[in-house]
Structures are given as C-alpha cells and as structure tokens.
Image: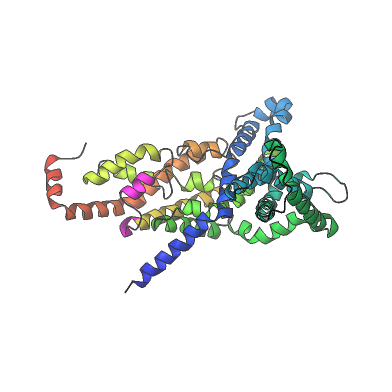
Amino acid sequence: MSHPIGILRQRLISALTAMSDNTCLAAIRAGMIAIVPLTIIGGLFTAICNLPVAGWDEWAAPVLPLLRVPVTATFGLLAVFVCFAIAYDLGQRLNQEAILSASMAALVFLMLQIDREKQALTMAGLGSEGLFTAILVALVVVRVQKFFTDRNLVIRLPSSVPAVVYESFLSIVPMAVLVLVFWLIRFGAGIDLNAGVQAVFSPLVFALDTLPGILAYAFLVTLLWSVGINGDNTLDAIVAPVFLQYLALNVQAADAGHALPHVTALGFFTTFVNVGGTGATIALALIMLNSREPGYRKVSRLSLPTQIFQINEPIFFGFPIVLNPVLMAPYILNALLLTAGTYLLMEGGLISKPFVNIPWTTPPIIGHYLATGGDWRAAAWGVLSIVLAMAVYYPFAKAAERQRLKAQPGASIRLDSAGPAG
C-alpha cells in the first residue's frame, strides 16, 4: 500500500506542475521576463536622476527633465509593453499569428484607456495602474483570436496574395468583434475595467507588501523548492505583476522626490532574500569549501562560481538540499530570516527600498547597492546577510557532514590522518 504522505506529495507535485505548465501562466511569465530590459533602462535613469551625491540635485537640475524622458517611456508605458509581450507569447503558444495577437491586444488595451469625456488617452492607465488590465486583455484577445481561427470564422484571401496581406486579413473579423465588445463595455456601459480589475486583485496587492504576506510567500517558495519544485517559477506568474507594480510606483515616487511607498518591490526577493540563490545557499557553499567530506567539498567548490551570479542548482541538487531533512530546515529558515530582517530594516528606514531593477544574476552585495540606488547600508546588510545565513547553516551542515563521514568510516580515517583539506 502506498504511503499517504507519498500520495499527497505526488498529487501536490502534479497539481503544481500543471499550474506551472499552464499556457496562460507561462505566457504571463514569459511576457514579464521580456520587458525586464525596459525596466532596467528606466531604473538606471531613475538612479541617475537621484544619485546619492551631495549637491547633485542642484547641479543636474537643468537636465533632469531630459533625464526623466526614458523613465516615462519605460515605466510610464509599462502596461502597454506588458500587454503586447504577453499577447505575442500566448499567440505563439496557441499557433496564432503572434504579431497580430500582440497588435490586437495593444489596440483593445489602448482603447480602454481613452477617457470617456475628454476622448483622450489617460496616461495613468498606461503605466502601473493598468498592469492587471493589460494582462487580462492580452489573455482574452488571443483566446478570442484562436476561437475564430479554429472555426474558420476569418477572411481568407486566395493563396496567390502576398503572405503579409493574407495574414493581416485574418485578424479583421476577430478584431472587429473585440473592438465592438470592449467598446460597449467601456463606453456603452461606462465600466472602468482598470478600477474593476484592480479591485479584484487588491487583496493580493495588499498582502504581498506586508510582513506576514511576504513571509508566507518566502515560506511557500522555499517549501516547494525543498520537494523538488521550482518555487520561484511556479509562483512567478502570480506575483510578478504585483512586484512590478510596486517597483513602478517606487520609481514614480523617486522621480517625484517622494518617500518610496513599497518595501517588497521587484528586486526585494531576488536580491535581498535569494542571496547567492534561493535560500541564501552561497553561505552553505562557503561553509563547506574545506569540508572533510570530499563530496561536499567538491560540490561547494564547483558551485560557488555560479552562486556568485545567483545560480544555485549545482549545490541544491548536488548536496542535495531537496528532500534532505537535515538541510531543508536551514534552507527555509534562512529565507524567512532574510525576508523579515530586510523588511524591518526597510520599513524602519535603516536601508533604502528597491527602486532600480537589476538583472537577477547580479552578484550579492553589488546587487544590494544597485537595487537601492547606491545605498551603502544596503550593501553592508548584504554582507551581514551572508554571515547570518552561514550561522544558520553551520550546525546543520556539520551535522550532515558527520552523518556522511559516519557512513564512510574508511574515508573519514584517511581524511583525518591526512590533515585538513586544502
């Protein structure tokens, strides 16, 4: 008879794997990744506008309006790019003409941002305020496009017509239906979809910027990793839009010279919690660099170069941490410790909140400094984070080492007689 825990675990893995492989969630995840370069560029210009250098504001005042242009062109139009990118990726996944998918989604989304009275685009809806609407529109538009295509409810020209013209006519019928339906919703019924969608997601948006909420997220991510499921990827499609919205609002606040409103903006978790990889495993590698157990020593030395760039799969599966009761506990505990510590320090104003999006592969400490726009205190916390994580891992790592050496007494004697490892 199968063990109940084994059955539960298998069902959990199957359910989470199905969620991770879901076409719509995969498209959202891919679309959010596609716009990362835009947010990095916008963040860099935001950092330049707010350099932590005495007298910079006065010196740069004449050119600040020009320096803010790339910020407006990226974060100010964030929802437009998100809508286009997600629709394009989903169109490809559903075997549609992807460029038509993206174009139709962008058209519908922009139409929804037109003020009913002034008949002009509302710029606020093109940025972070319209982010969830952009995602919804992208998903709906491509699904409608597929519905019409699968049932041949499209205009097909003779094959002799150039491919570009042929493909463009395929979109006329679904585009007309989509424009009519969303026009009736927005201008006929007067429904503000931006406000409605934001209201639906408001509990999630609120929770992830609280200490209990972000701790629950950190626990779930590391728990999933501990049983062999990529927790970051599994939950990313759900939480990434929220963290990106926080980042955009922090950028707006920084650009206006106001206090940053959100602690857990994009970069909080990837930089301040995932120090050297999820679970701060760079600390484990540092502890075991000279381990008496040759397997641990070799894995640590091989994985350390990748962990400098936040990639920890070699040590995670090499020790392993996955399904290893001895190392799972400190792995999860470190994520919770760094989440709580960073949150409290930022909320208390002791280190700056993130407002510059940096590549997730940026080395620790450097990433801490850059994500906060050049706050040396954040870099110091990065150093302390690694030290704290080492302190948490140490007793467990040594227990695992003793356990491994006990199972190989001959190797233990040889190693002891040879002196410390080099």
Q: Nearer the viewer, residue 238 or 63?
A: 238
User: Magenta residues: mostly which secondary structure?
Assistant: helix
Q: Left of 363 or right of it: where is 197? A: right
Q: Name the residue furthest right.
A: 117
Which colour assignment does the render follow? rainbow
Front residue of this view, candidates 83 and 359 = 83
Instruction: Look at the image and say whether residue 320 sits in the magenta stretch.
Output: yes
Q: Which residues are magenta?
A: 313-327
Residue 61 or 267: which is nearer the viewer? 267
Residue at 83% of width from left, 49% of height from top?
A: 115
Q: Residue furthest bottom?
A: 1
Q: Position of residue 377 (x, y in %)?
A: 51, 39
Q: Is residue 68 visible?
A: no
Q: Position of residue 302 (x, y in %)?
A: 31, 39
- At x 65%, y 59%, the residue is 201
Q: Is residue 23 among what the camera can see?
A: yes
Quadrant where the N terminus sits is bottom left
Image location of residue 53, percent across then percent down? 60, 30
Q: How many marks?
A: 0
Q: Which residue appears at 50% of the width and 38% of the height?
A: 367
Relative to 193, 363 lies left or right: left
Residue 333 within the segment the image draws in magenta: no
The quarter of the rendered structure image containing the C terminus is: top left
Q: Quadrant of residue 60?
A: top right
Q: Residue at x 34, y 58 (%)?
A: 323
